[in-house]
Image (tube, grey):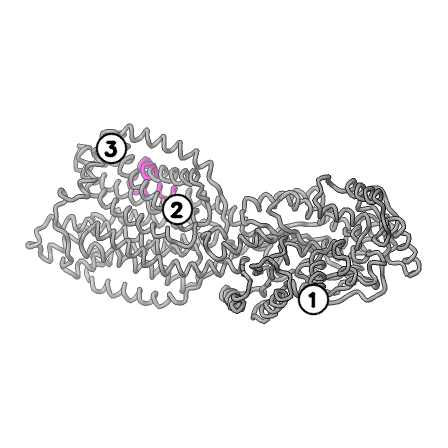
Amino acid sequence: MQRILKWPWVVIGIIAIITIFFAFQLPNIKINNAVKIFLPEDHPAKVANNKMEDIYGSSDIIGLAIKSKKGDLLNQQNIKEISQITKSLEEIVNVDEVTSITNADYISGTSKGMKVEELVEELPKSQSDIYDLKEKLLAWDLYRGNLYSDDLASTQIRVQLKKGLAIEEKEEVYNNIKNKLKKYNKHDFEFYLAGSPAVNVLMGNNMESDLRRLVPFVIAVVLIVLYLSFKNIGGVILPMLTVSISTIWALGIMALLGIELTMVSTVIPVLLVAVGSAYGIHIISHYYDDLRKESKHNLTEEKHREIVFKTVKKVGKPVLLAGLTTIVGFSSLATSSIIPIKEFGIFTAIGVFTALIVALTLIPAILLAQHGNLEYNEEEKEDSIINGVLMKLYSYFSGARVRVLVLAIIIMIASLYGISKVVIDNVMIEMFREDTEIRKADQFINQNFSGTNILNVMIDGPNDGSLTNPEVLKEMDNLNKYLINKYDQVGKVTSVADFIKRMNQVMHYPEEETEDTNQSQTEDLSENETTSDFGQETTSSFGEENTSDFGSETTSDFSEETTSDFGSSSKEKESESANEEVKNLAPSTKKMSEKEVIKLLNKAVVRAEKLDLTGEELVDAVSKELNYMGAAYNEVPYHPEKYPAQNREQLKNLVSQYLLMYSGSLDDLINEQLEPSKGRMMVQIKTGSNIVIKKIKKDIQNYIEHYFPDGYEVSMAGYADMSLAVNNLIVSSQIMSILVSLVVVFLIVAVTYRSVIAGLYGIIPLGISLLINFGIMGYTGIKLDIGTAMVASIAIGIGVDYTIHFLSAYHYERQRSEDLEEVCQNTILTAGKAIIFNAASVAAGFAVLLFSNFYPLVNLGLLVMLTMITSSIASMTILPALLNLFQPDFISK
């Protein structure tokens, strides 16, 4: 080291040049928080998502909810403005498709078969047109929760982005949407923007806000702590210079390598400012202690050089050892499979290494170049306040060593119980504070619509046309009902089965109801039960003459209550069958007696799947009994006896005919329009909780194993699946990083002191600190997520410094005295003071995170503060108690 410091100005110049080079790289650093980047490229969840997007297109969807402040959404003025908003959104660059209440497609039955038209072909001009629109909306359940809320006060516009957009392009789309909406603020609308692209964009914006606010804040806090600790310019400037340089180097290397900043790596500048100052603190603290022993008037240049070299020699080893163990603590995060945590560990370790090198070279170089001209406090240490506090603490604990150890054991047992209560859940939206725009939007959409979180169930058949098989379509529909009935959090399940059901229904309208459907819908609004489709492009109608007949009544269950002559070429036969159905089922043209009405209602209730029917469910059951608007055929064609088919193979052909008739686009649900072999079910979930998603995914897997036909491979993909994968990796990554860092710290200490026992002493305070940390998480309800998952490694990486410095100082004093009382006092007065300065600086630095925009970082700051307190106290109480009680050989060698 003396050789390097022989030319102090050269050292200063080289470090300055390197720092300037990396500073010029900083503007190139980018921000990205897409959930995809949290997983390695070969992770099954990421592979599945990429495969899904290759087949079905982009899964990046922004949901725009529009609420009418007056509660009346369906009026002429509102519909007009929603249409204008829809058209303006379609003009935005990189928007692939926009679906709203004014441009979604509507499938209806006519005397000629199936007709596909827009929900709003012309803007409403009268109240009758509004009634017609409302009836269409209520006609198909897929619209409910997607295009309109149950109170009919809100609607939602679905903005699908193009595939493969960079985060900057997504941000541009998001900002353009907001700009388009500004001119409508004067009207009676409230707007809510949610969805994963919006989350990613706003997370990036909040990260930039954090960096602008928190980095200057943490610098100011650490400067204050340093001044209160040293009360001189040198003790403030030199440690801060070290951390500033290390931060620039670490972030500059990230920018140079094209590594993007994430919410996790936002912590790096704050952490390096708080942690990196430790090495400078220890050097400066010991330097001033030695300097005070010399009279300032007798301090020659040569004497000053001796003091500097003596300080470096005395402190260099423990500082280097502490630095290496800290680097190991952060490097252990490189074992994580979560990419941002891995990158955080690597570049924090680089920053710590830089801070270590700069502290051991630049600070001594500056001290030598200044020839001792830096101002310092000459007050004797015996009279200092900090030493007085230290001695009081020592006096208190030194007489109660056994009680200290017993108390430590009790705390450990209580912490273990708290650990059992720790909840593991990494919810991206819950990272934002409750009062943020995105949190409010997500909450509003989840409360009023089907949900912002989507889990995709991917179904892969054995050959072309496998997805027209009634067996698999029926089970897809049953799975839909199963999830809706079991989970309140599941708002909607959409699949090609829903379209087959709708096509089957409209192709079996009774003939008198197909003569003029639109007129009938307007005139009989109070009697109609309606449903609709969400977000599918359907541009053609079935133009051939092909109507359906509803025939004889069966007695098995409501799904088999009629038979059909679908496909008959005889118009006369269809009319005759329809007339027979009028006689048998008493449609709206026949007056019914009170007794017949009661019999009809009773039959509807008997055939229902449950008895506690709501009014809506009762109307639906009666509609099925009457086959009103084809309600009895709102099903997947499954029972051959109900259709002109001898077996299900012929029903499969019927499904294929439906798909042929429907010449619009189902590209986001099946891979091929006529002979699909692959399909997906989109499960919309009203929460981001991975605990709930895990249960839903497990139930889906169990259902598929028990009920789906053989030969179909089923997997899951999408945002919810990747989020769950990240959540699962948190635990394994946490365990691995803790084990690696503890083992390496143990080895470093053991090798340094050539003793296995020394290694154990080195990790005991850390182990206690970690137990307390996780125990408090359990008791306070702080979740283990992407932010708090880093606490353990940070605690080990930083907390081990206190143990290293105490062991080093205790070893130094123990070699000079057999009086354990004197050894402990001297250790406390030298290393103890530096430990307190260090812990206070780090804790104060991390306290700045309490003002972060993200809850995981708030919790991270809180928990690191806690671990700084517990690990520093443990190193100055439990460690000396153990050393004095057992007097291990390694400490006196």
Q: Is residue 149 magenta?
A: no
Nearest the viewer among 774 and 257 is: 774
Q: Which residue is mark 3?
A: 397
Where does the image place residue 478, in percent across and percent down from the top left? Answer: 71, 46
Q: Can residue 660 be spotted in the picture?
A: no
Question: Predominant secondary structure in magenta?
Answer: helix
Amino acid tagged 3: Phe
Amino acid tagged 2: Ser
Q: Which residue is mark 1?
A: 126
Ranked by sequence position, the earlier of labels 3 and 1 is 1
Residue 96's quadrant in the figure?
Answer: bottom right
Q: Can residue 196 be spotted in the picture?
A: yes
For marks 2 and 3, give the CA distance. 29 Å
Q: From which residue to which does the magenta span run?
A: 742-764
Ranked by sequence position, the earlier of labels 2 and 1 is 1
Q: Which residue is mark 2?
A: 793
